[in-house]
Structures are given as structure tokens and as C-alpha cells.
Image (tube, grey):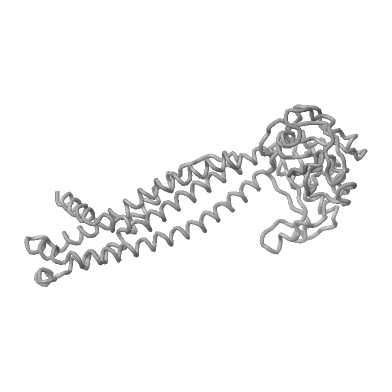
Amino acid sequence: MIFKYTFKTALNGLRTNKSRSALTILGIVIGVASIIAIESIGEGAQLLIVRQLEGLGSQTIVIQPGREPKGLSDFASLFLDSLKEKDLLALKNKNNVPTLLDLSPEIIVPGSVTYLGESKDALTIGTSPAMTQILDLYPTEGVFFSDEDVANYSYVAVIGSKVKEKFFGDGDVLNQKIKIRNRNFRVVGVFSSAGQAMMFDVDSLVIIPYTTAQRYLLGTDHYTEIVARAVSKETVDQTARDIVATLREAHGITDPAKDDFHIQTQEDIQQRAGMITDILKMLLMSVAAISLLVGGIGIMNIMLVSVTERTREIGLRKAIGARSKDILWQFLVEAVLLTLTGGGLGVMLGAGISFMAALVLSRLVAIGWVFTFPLSAALVGLAVAFLVGLVFGIYPARKAAKKDPIEALRYE
């Protein structure tokens, strides 16, 4: 019963100054809302990455030039030309990698694609027919180019659904000519809407033979990356070890620290992506924590002002029998009520911001973003709000409780 009356007294105290109470909790609202929004958007990003990686296939291994990035200085090595045809031939040798099922080089060709003088943004990739098996992705119109096209450096292309829509609309597309880097390519196939695969938007891709891209478009003899597929999920680790051993032998590398290539499996990429998003969330949450700290200091300041303004009230309550601990609890409950109210409003605001962000990303930016409400983050936000009220409310509450009733009644 005593706590019930303490709670009602604290609530009445807050109602007396509604505007001030609302402004006081603004820092808490912003801090908790930031925590909810950051956690929700972070979880949405992780789910998006996981879905994209599922398109990569659990049996897929990606081989990239340069050593594995572990610091800013390592990123320059990613542009090395260390993956060449001799490596492709060595990896295709069953004696070297017996558990390898498919293998396909990839070359990214920068620049736009042109049709009838109109240029559109599209990502052009040179690859081989093996890519269709690796990604389980086949044209719904026409065909994919053949190994013979690769051997003959043919000017043929397979395009995504968005590229078709941009250039041809509902018209005929097969055997039409598009221009890439001033070279005419004949469209032989079209993918239906397929979304993400290997971190690429398949719908916006233009795929051509990698030999043509090397010789006639870029004039290079190396690959951007090589994509391989093991015979089964269980043999991925063994396949990866064999690939590493084969490439080290081909490159004359005896010290693993001097590797000029690195490999990634779906599990590796997923772990790294999760680690990156977790680090970003922690950094952003530290900024939100500063907002909560500022909000806590603001609450302590306002509570001290409230104690001073209500000095006669404190003296009157003590004069009619209120104990020091009753005064202490009254002001402490006020502080906690303020922060919990701010925490609750922050949870609702954060959920609203997260939902709107997911809506914009999924509809306007055409990304398959899913809204997630982080219940754990909401509970943590409310718990932190409670602790902020408790910690920053103790000093003003103790100061109120220690006031002498006679001096308090004399206060003007």
C-alpha cells in the first residue's frame, strides 16, 4: 500500500509539469529509438545477405586474386592479375582437385550497354557455360552460349529481365544487337526475373563469353575471379584445400603468408558479413548510448530543479509524518517513470522508423528487405531506460530526502 501511494504521488508530480516532463525524456526517446532502429535494420541486412548467399550454393567456392583482406593495406592486393588460364587448366586437372565438379572464370567489364544509340547502366560479366550449372540459372528465352562460342570468341550475349525491359520492352529480343564497348553482340538468351545470385542482380546482368571479354573488350589475360563447385556439400572443405595446394604449386608459393589469392566458401562469406554488420551495429549503438547518457544527465538536472521548486512541499510532507525514505522513493520513482515512459515511446518510434526504412528499401530501391522487430533490443532498451532513471535519479532523490523539514517550510 505504501508503494501504491508513493507511485500515485510521483505520478501526480509528473502530471503537474507535463511539458517539462515531455522535454526531459526526449533524450531517452531518441536513444532507445536509435537502438531499436539500428538493431532492426542490422538484422534486416543480415537476412538479406543470407538470402543472397543462398543463391551462391552451399557447394560453391569463390577464388579471388590477392591475399585475404585483414587490414586496409591488404585491399590493394585484390587488384592483382594472379588468376590466369594456367590456373584454370591446373584446377580442371582431376589429379589435382578430384572433388571439383564445375569451374568457371569471371571477368567484370566496366561501362554501359548501348542499343540503337541509347545507353543504359548494366553490369557486363564474361563467364563460361559452366556458370549455369553452378548457379542453377538458365535462360527462359533462347539459350545460353556454348563452349564453342567461348572457344571461337563469339560476340553473343545473354541478358537479364531488366535489361530486356529497358531496351526492348515487350518486343522481340532474340538476335537483336546490343553494343558493349563499341562492339556489337547478338542477344541469344534472356533470363526471367531471378533476383540476387552471387551478390549480383541477375536481372541487370549482361553475360558474354569470358574469352571475348578478355581479348576484344579489355585486352587482358587474367580473371576477376574463378567460381568453382564441389561435388557435394560434404567435400567443400577438401575441395578448398586441394584448390589452395594446386594454386600454390602453380604460383611457386611455399610460404602461405605470401599467397597471391584467397578462397571463400558460402560459410566464410556469411561469417564475415555477419561480423561486419555486428561491428557496425556496435559502433552505431555506442552513439545511441551517448544519447542515453545525455538524456540521463538531463533528467538528473531537471529532477534537481524539481527538488528545489518543491522544497516547501517536501517540508510539509515531513511535517505531517513522511519519513526521509518516503521522500527518497517518491523522487526516485518519478525519475524511473520518466525514463521508462521515454523508453516505451522510444521502442514505438524505433519500430516505426525501422518499418518505414524496410518499406522504402523493399519498394522504392527494389531490394528484398524484410522488416524485423528485435524483441531483445526492445527489452534491453527498456532495461537501460530503467537503469538510467535509477542511477541518475538517486542523487536528486537523496538530496530531497535529506532536507530539514523546518528549513524546508521556511523556503521561499
From this viewpoint, is residue 134 visible?
Answer: no
**Along the line of sight, the residue nearer the viewer: 4 or 23:** 23
Image position, residue 182 (x, y; %): 86, 45
> Please, is residue 361 above or below residue 334 in the view?
above
Instruction: State the image quarter where residue 193 is shown.
Output: top right
Residue 11: % across, % down: 21, 52
> How far across and how far down the image is residue 411, in percent?
13, 71
- Up the image or down, 410 lies above or below 91; here it is below
Q: Is residue 402 above or below residue 54?
A: below
**Residue at the (84%, 43%) spot, across then down:** 210
Residue 251 in the figure: left or right of residue 54:
right
| Residue sitting at x 86%, y 50% | 218
> Which residue is at the front of the view, 357 or 325?
357
Q: In the displayed image of the protein, which residue is found farthest to the left?
A: 320
Question: What is the total number of numbered labels drawn onto the structure image?
Answer: 0
82 sits left or right of 22 in the view: right
In terms of image quadrants, where is residue 391? bottom left
Q: Nearer the viewer, residue 235 or 45?
A: 45
Q: Position of 150 compared to 328: left or right?
A: right
In the picture provided, is 75 more to the left or to the right than 298?
A: right
Name the quadrant of the C terminus. Answer: bottom left
Return the residue nearer the eye: 199 or 16.
16
Residue sitting at x 38%, y 53%: 29
Q: Is residue 258 visible?
A: yes
